[in-house]
C-alpha cells in the first residue's frame, strides 16, 4: 500500500492521505477520524486498520483530517467535499467513520449531492447538535449501512442509533469492547472491510 497526501478542494483547508491499493481501483472509501478536539486525526489506529484491510481488497482509502473546528457543521462539509473529490475519480464511493467521524459519515451520506455506495460507522455519536442528528439522518440514506458498536462504550450514547438501525433493518455489529476497541482493531477492520468490500 502506498499513501500520498491530498488537498481536498473546498473553502476549508482539508488534508488527507490517499492509501492506494495495488490494483487500479475503481472504488474508494472516505475515512473520517474521531473528534479533532480530542486529538482525532487521519492517523487514528482504527482508521489505519480499516484502510489496510480495504486496500488489501483492492479498494483505495482516503483518510481525512478536518479543517478548523466548526462544531460539526464545517466538518460535515469537509466529509461531503472529500466524497465529491472521490466521486470525481472513482466509480463507487464508500464512507467509514469512527466516533465523531462515525456520526459525520452518516450525516454526510444523508445529505451529499453525489451517490454514496455504502456507509460503515464505528461507535458513532448519535448527534452533534439538534440539527446534526445521526439517528434522524439514517432514514435519508439510500445505500447499505453498517453500525458497529462496543457494548461497554460509555463515551458516546450509542443506544438510540443502534435501536433505530435495527428498526430500519440496518446491519449492526456488536463488540465486547469499550469505545476505543482496545486490542480489537483487527476484528473491527475485518468486520468493516468485509461489509465495505462486499458492497463496493
Image (cartoon, rainbow, N blue to C red):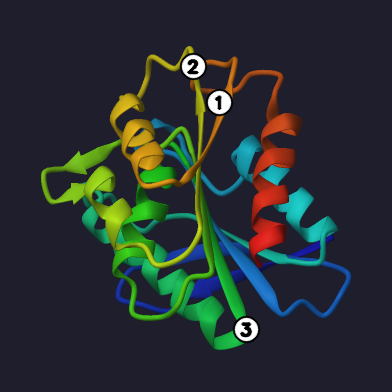
Q: Is residue 114 visible?
A: yes
Say if mark 1 contacts mark 3, CB within 8 Å.
no
Query: Which of the 4 image quadrants contains residue 86?
Result: bottom right
Compared to 92, does 200 lie above or below? above
- The earlier-in-sequence mark between 1 and 2 is 2
Sequence-earlier tag: 3 or 2? 3
Badge number at residue 151? 2
Is 106 displayed left or right of 190 in the figure? left
Q: Whole-percent x and y of residue 74? A: 26, 60
Distance in Å between CA atoms under marks 3 and 2: 35 Å
Front residue of this view, candidates 138 and 184: 138
State left or right for residue 137 relative to residue 188: left
Query: Which residue sits at x=59%, y=39%?
Result: 44
The quarter of the picture where residue 1 lies is: bottom right
The reply to whether the C-beta atoms of the residues labelled 1 and 2 are less than 8 Å apart is yes
- Between 114 and 2, the residue placed more toward the observer is 114
Q: Of tags 1 and 3, which is closer to the observer?
A: 1
Residues at circles 3 and 2 in contact by the CB criterion of under 8 Å: no
**CA distance separating discs 1 and 2:** 6 Å
Farthest residue to the bottom: give it. 88
In the image: residue 29, left or right of residue 159? right
**x 81%, y 66%: residue:** 58
Please give the name of the residue rendered at 70% of the width and 49% of the height, measured from the top-left corner: 193
The residue carrying mark 3 is 91
Residue at the left extreme of this rendering: 130
In this view, 131 is above or below 7? above
Residue placed under numbered mark 1 in the picture: 174
Category of crowding for the residue at label 2, using alpha-carbon neighbours closer than 10 angstroms: few (below 14), some (14–19), many (at least 20): some
Name the N-terminal-most of marks 1 and 3. 3
Q: CA distance from mark 1 to mark 3?
A: 31 Å
Disc 3 element = loop
Amino acid at each position: 500500500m502506498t499513501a500520498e497526501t491530498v488537498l481536498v478542494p473546498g473553502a476549508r483547508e482539508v488534508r488527507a492521505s490517499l492509501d492506494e491499493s495495488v490494483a487500479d481501483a475503481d472504488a474508494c472509501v472516505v475515512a473520517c477520524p474521531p473528534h479533532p478536539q480530542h486529538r482525532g486525526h487521519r492517523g487514528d489506529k482504527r482508521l489505519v486498520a480499516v484502510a489496510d484491510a480495504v486496500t488489501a481488497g483492492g479498494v483505495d482509502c482516503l483518510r481525512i483530517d478536518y479543517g478548523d473546528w466548526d462544531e460539526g457543521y464545517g466538518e460535515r462539509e469537509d466529509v461531503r467535499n472529500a466524497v465529491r473529490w472521490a466521486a470525481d475519480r472513482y466509480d463507487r464511493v464508500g464512507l467509514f467513520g469512527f466516533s465523531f467521524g462515525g456520526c459525520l459519515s452518516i450525516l454526510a451520506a444523508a445529505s451529499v449531492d453525489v451517490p454514496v455506495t455504502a456507509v460503515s460507522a464505528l461507535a458513532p455519536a448519535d448527534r452533534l447538535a439538534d440539527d446534526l442528528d445521526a439517528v434522524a439522518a439514517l432514514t435519508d440514506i439510500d445505500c447499505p449501512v453498517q453500525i458497529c458498536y462496543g457494548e461497554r462504550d460509555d463515551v458516546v450514547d450509542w443506544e438510540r442509533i443502534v435501536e433505530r438501525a435495527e428498526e430500519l433493518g440496518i446491519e449492526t455489529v456488536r463488540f465486547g469492547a469499550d469505545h476505543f476497541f482496545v486490542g480489537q482493531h483487527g476484528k473491527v477492520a475485518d468486520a468493516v472491510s468485509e461489509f465495505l468490500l462486499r458492497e463496493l
